Image (tube, rainbow, N blue to C red):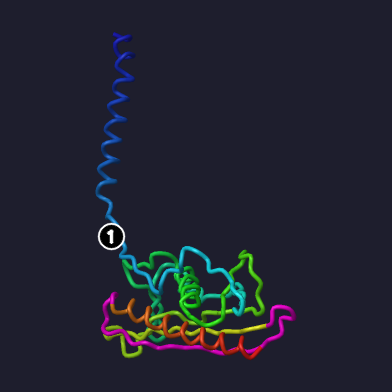
Amino acid sequence: MTPALTRAGPFVRLIGLGACALALSACVSLLPKTKPAHLYRFGQPAGAEAMTATPGQIGVFRTNASFQRESAGDRLLTVDGGKIAYVAETRWVTPAAVLWDEAVLAAFDADPGPVRLISRGEPATADYVLRLDVRNFEARYLSGPKLAPTVVVRVRAAMTGRADRALIAERIFEKQVPAADNRVGAIVSAYDKAVAEVLAEVVTWTTEQAKRG
């Protein structure tokens, strides 16, 4: 009798473990599922190949800069008075700071002017240094959370000499673009327009400063 009980012991334990495993699997299946986030982008992607400097072009080195910390990631920041929140189930396809960098490069590449923007590591000579600090990058609900927000993009630009690092000029660029309505698609379109308008002015300003030098 005793050996029979001994042989049955492991079997009983296996049954117990199996029952626990089934119970755990049932618990896991009952956990709420996270809805997939909708992905968006702003700006135009930079070209795959870097442009080659040619005679007559002015090299401007773009140095590292800051980006509003709350909105530098992949979430869309909204501001309603003193309340700050992120748009639910919505993400930028990559962090906003990365999309901004791509948009800056694309804006200068698309401009027919003489300025050639040079990034770190490129084998090219620069005459000037450009720093772009993104101070605000957010959707503001100026008339309450139920109405369409206004996208605000505010950038401080500073241009210095490459050799002596002396400040040549600095300026604040700001664009406020109201979204057509309070939908994510309309808000993203407002971001895209605000970025395009700010960068168009930045490119023009940078070219003017470079020509004066």
Q: The C terminus is located in which quarter?
A: bottom right
Q: For the point 27% across and 39% down, which residue is it?
A: 23
From this view, report whether residue 60 is shown above or below residue 3.
Answer: below
Left/right of residue 68 with respect to residue 12 in the rendered view: right
Callout 1: few (<14), some (14-19), or many (20+) C-alpha neighbours within 10 Å? few
Name the residue located 29 percent from the left edge and 60 percent from the top edge. Answer: 36
Q: Is residue 162 magenta?
A: yes
Local SS, label 1: loop
Residue placed most toward the observer, 26 or 132:
132
The x, y position of residue 122, in whole percent, is: 61, 65
Residue pushed farthest right? 164
Image quadrant in which you'd find residue 140: bottom left
Kindly identify the residue that appears in the image at 27 percent across and 45 percent down. Answer: 27
- Is 184 part of what is drawn in magenta? yes
Is 58 displayed left or right of 144 in the figure? right
Amino acid carrying mark 1 in the image: Lys
Please tell me which residue is depicted at 36% across the width and 86% down the height of the picture.
150
Instruction: For the N terminus, give its image quadrant.
Output: top left
List x then y, in percent, for residue 4. 29, 11
The percent position of residue 90, horizontal first and vertical second, equals 33, 68
The one of 176 and 146 positioned closer to us in this rendering: 176
In the picture provided, is 24 more to the left or to the right than 47? left
Q: Which residues are magenta?
A: 161-185
Circle 1 sits on which residue?
A: 35
53 w.r.t. 151: above or below: above
